[in-house]
Structure formats: structure tokens, C-alpha cells
């Protein structure tokens, strides 16, 4: 492991030296590749948590209970992620970003590919549960180390009237990762017998995830080793600070930043993981067809994310986030019931949901990053992302399925409504604090 970072960094420096400094377009491509790889890992696990792990790891439980157990393990990565940020921030400060990114992405790839070799409960008993949980925690810790600050840089260093456009670029990786993961699983589920799929077919996407991580690692190192990136680091735009110190100075803004995108993060799992579990458990439809619907809907999500950049540059990012939260609140009142309305209802739910997700999620990254002081911005942005995913998305599939299975689909909408309310309150509180701070500055 000590040799791998040095070799990877050396090769990246050779390429950077041949091609000169990296332009914004290359940064954008590197960010998209990196985020796509992360979300591909994320969705490969998410899909397997619905159609594979309940049967493989929890065969002793009924399908609903087994899926709830699977979703509980799913949440472990979000709990572990802030701890990963603490660990890898220390590595970053001691050894640099290239070492940090290499170790983090190798850990992510190793944890992911380890799941591909996971024996089932029928082979090793309860040890299968513990091994899956350990791999999931490893993924979460690794995600805490994959933060490179490039997403915030794109938004904060963009021209004033183009910040919305640059802010949406990293978010495109989410639906792209889902498209690839869903298409892969749809192919194997639709073309293999049940015996072959549960024997080896489901494992293949996890192997693919490791290969994609290698590509993503090199794409990121290509940028990290450039003189431009080094200059930004030295100017403190990319310099990590101790986590405790960051929380002490920026705790208020981190809390606001974590709750501001809650509507989009709650919707994120309400249109990706939860509907697959509901359709798989409570309808006669097979997973392959719904995964195709999900893939098509995600394409609409890509278009909506791109549109969010154009809209945000016209009306403002916060205005778009607030308007999207209101739309998500309205969506929560009627849309979940469409999952019981056959293929037409499912398609309408997914497409409309992904359009709303794209508009809100496209601007959710670093919505209050400009509020952080320059010294703490890098680490504060990482922590904000960690807590936003934890509070907004970590328990969403578990909570939504638990509520819907006991009180009907309308209760899942109530969960989504609570996320929209949190976003509106956080944005309002943020605006009030900014006004108060400005008034205080004038008085002094």
C-alpha cells in the first residue's frame, strides 16, 4: 500500500508534465469521473441490498424483514463516513492528498470487491452478516477519504454569473453511476436463471466497480499533482484543518449546510432504492423491468441537473433550492401512491421524481460553502457533505420501507415531506443569520 500511492503519483506527474497545467474542462471531467465511480459503487450495493442480500445473507427471515435488515447494514456506511473524514484528514495533513486519495480509493475498491466474494448465510452462518457489515463500514470510511475539494472549487472559483452551472457538474455523476449500475443488474437479472444470478451473476458488478475505481483514481491524481492545484492548496483553498478545530469555528454553518439539502437527499433514495424495494416486495413485477424504468428515469435526471445550472444562474441557487423543496413537498403528497398503479404509474413516479431530484440535487452541493471562512472551507465542506448524507439519506430506505409497509405509501410521502420542511427551515435560518451578521458588522 505504501508503494502504490508513490507509483500512482509518479505516473500522474509524468502525464501532467507532458501536458502542462490542467484547464477547467479537465477538472470538470476529473470530477465527473470521480463522482460517477463513487456513485456506481453506491448503487451497485444499493441494488444488491434489495434483490440479493435479503436472500443471501438473511434467508431465515421473511422477505420484508430481511430487506429491513439489509437496509440497516446499508446505513452503516453513512454512519462511518464522518469517521473516515477524520481519519483521512489526518492522513492528508501528514502525507498529502495523493496519498490520501490513493489509500481511500483502494479501500473503497477493496471493500467493494470483497463483497463480490461474500459467502452466504447457508455457507458460513451469521459470519456472513458480520462480513457484509464490515465491508459496508469500509466503504463508508473510504468515502470520507475521497473528498478532494474539487467540487467546491468549481463552484467557488467560477465566474459570478456561472456558479450555478459549475456547481451542477459534480452532481451529474450520481445519475450516471445509477444508469450504469441499473443497466448492469437489469442485464444479469433479465438474462440469467435465478440459480445462476444468485450464484455468480450478482457478483460481476462489484468486480466492475473495482476497475472503475482505478480509472477514477488516476483521473483525480492527474489533477491533484498539477502546479495549479498545489497553488490552491498553498493559498488555503484546499488545505485541510483539524476536524475538532473546524467544528469549533464553523459548527453553525456546517449544521445549516447539512440540513439545507435535506429535501433533495431524502428524495434521492425515495426515487432510487425505496421504489425498487417496494415493487420487488409488494408487486408481481420482476426487478429487471423496473431497473430499466429506473435507468430511463435517470437520463431525465441528468437533463434536469444540467438545467438546474442554467436556472440557478438566473434566479439564484438558494431560490432554486427553496422552490424545489416546495415542489418536493407537493410531490410527497400524491406521488408515492403511484407505485401501486402498475407500469404507467411507476414510470410517471420515477420520471417526475428524477426531474425534481435533478433540479434540487444539482445545486445541493456546497449550498452554503461560501459562508465558510477560507481557512476552514475545505474540511468544513467535507463534514457538511458527510452529515447531509447521514441525516438526509442514510436511513431513508429503511425508514420509508418500514413506514410504508405498516401505514401505506402515503406515510413514505410524510417522510419526504419532513425533508422538504427541514430544507426550507435551514435556508430561512441561513438567510436570517447572514442578515444578522451583516447588521453586526455595520454596527462595529
Image (tube, rainbow, N blue to C red):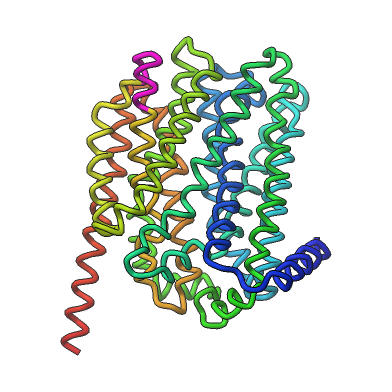
Locate residue 167: give its quadrant: bottom left
Check the image and name the residue furthest to the bottom.
Answer: 444
Q: x and y percent of residue 74 in the render? A: 55, 38
Along the line of sight, the residue nearer the viewer: 129 or 32: 32
Q: x and y percent of residue 106 in the render? A: 72, 53
Along the line of sight, the residue nearer the viewer: 311 or 19: 19
Magenta segment: 339-349
- Position of residue 32 relative to residue 412, above or below, is below
- Position of residue 54 relative to residue 437, above or below, is above
Instruction: Report the side of 160 relative to 177 (left or right).
Output: left
Along the line of sight, the residue nearer the viewer: 404 or 214: 214
- Could you tell me which residue is drawn at 38 percent across and 13 percent down? 342
Q: x and y percent of residue 128 in the render? A: 71, 31
Residue 343 is a magenta residue:
yes
Locate residue 346: give its quadrant: top left
- Could you tell me which residue is drawn at 44 percent across and 37 percent down? 269
Check the image and name the residue furthest to the right.
Answer: 3
- Main SS of the magenta part reads helix
Amino acid at each position: 500500500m505504501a508503494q502504490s500511492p508513490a507509483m500512482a503519483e509518479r505516473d500522474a506527474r509524468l502525464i501532467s508534465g507532458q501536458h502542462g497545467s490542467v484547464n477547467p474542462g479537465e477538472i470538470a471531467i476529473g470530477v465527473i469521473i470521480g463522482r460517477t465511480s463513487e456513485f456506481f459503487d453506491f448503487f451497485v450495493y444499493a441494488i444488491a441490498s434489495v434483490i440479493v442480500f435479503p436472500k443471501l445473507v438473511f434467508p431465515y427471515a421473511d422477505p420484508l424483514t430481511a430487506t429491513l435488515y439489509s437496509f440497516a447494514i446499508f446505513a452503516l456506511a453513512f454512519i462511518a463516513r464522518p469517521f473516515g473524514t477524520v481519519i483521512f484528514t489526518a492522513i492528508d495533513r501528514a502525507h498529502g492528498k495523493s496519498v490520501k486519495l490513493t489509500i481511500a480509493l483502494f479501500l473503497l475498491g477493496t471493500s467493494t470487491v470483497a463483497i463480490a466474494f461474500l459467502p452466504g448465510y447457508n455457507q458460513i452462518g451469521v459470519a456472513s452478516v458480520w462480513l457484509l457489515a464490515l465491508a459496508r463500514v469500509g466503504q463508508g470510511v473510504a468515502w470520507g477519504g475521497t473528498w478532494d475539494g474539487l467540487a467546491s472549487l468549481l463552484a467557488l472559483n467560477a465566474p459570478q454569473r456561472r456558479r450555478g452551472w459549475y456547481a451542477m457538474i459534480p452532481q451529474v455523476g450520481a445519475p450516471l453511476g445509477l444508469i450504469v449500475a441499473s443497466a448492469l443488474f437489469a442485464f444479469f437479472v433479465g438474462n440469467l436463471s435465478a440459480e445462476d444470478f444468485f450464484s455468480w451473476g450478482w457478483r460481476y458488478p462489484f468486480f466492475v466497480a473495482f476497475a472503475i475505481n482505478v480509472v477514477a483514481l488516476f483521473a483525480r491524481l492527474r489533477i491533484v499533482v498539477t502546479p495549479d492545484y498545489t497553488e490552491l492548496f498553498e493559498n488555503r483553498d484546499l488545505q485541510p484543518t483539524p476536524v475538532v478545530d473546524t467544528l469549533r469555528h464553523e459548527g453553525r454553518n456546517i449544521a445549516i449546510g447539512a440540513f439545507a439539502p435535506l429535501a433533495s437527499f431524502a428524495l434521492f433514495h425515495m426515487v432510487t432504492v425505496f421504489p425498487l424495494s417496494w415493487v420487488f416486495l409488494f408487486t408481481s413485477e420482476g426487478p429487471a423491468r423496473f431497473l430499466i424504468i429506473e435507468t430511463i428515469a435517470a437520463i431525465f435526471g441528468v437533463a434536469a441537473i444540467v438545467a438546474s445550472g442554467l436556472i440557478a444562474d438566473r434566479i439564484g441557487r438558494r431560490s432554486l433550492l427553496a422552490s424545489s423543496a416546495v415542489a418536493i413537498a407537493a410531490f410527497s403528497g400524491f406521488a408515492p401512491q403511484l407505485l401501486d398503479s402498475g407500469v404507467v404509474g411507476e414510470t410517471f413516479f420515477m420520471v417526475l421524481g428524477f426531474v425534481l431530484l435533478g433540479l434540487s440535487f444539482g445545486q445541493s452541493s456546497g449550498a452554503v460553502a461560501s459562508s465558510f471562512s477560507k481557512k476552514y472551507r475545505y474540511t468544513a465542506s467535507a463534514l457538511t457533505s458527510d452529515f447531509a448524507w447521514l441525516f438526509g439519506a442514510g436511513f431513508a430506505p429503511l425508514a420509508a420501507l418500514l413506514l410504508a409497509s405498516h401505514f401505506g405509501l402515503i406515510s413514505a410521502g410524510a417522510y419526504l415531506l419532513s425533508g422538504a420542511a427541514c430544507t426550507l427551515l435551514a435556508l430561512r435560518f441561513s438567510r436570517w443569520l447572514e442578515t444578522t451578521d451583516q447588521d453586526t458588522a455595520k454596527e462595529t
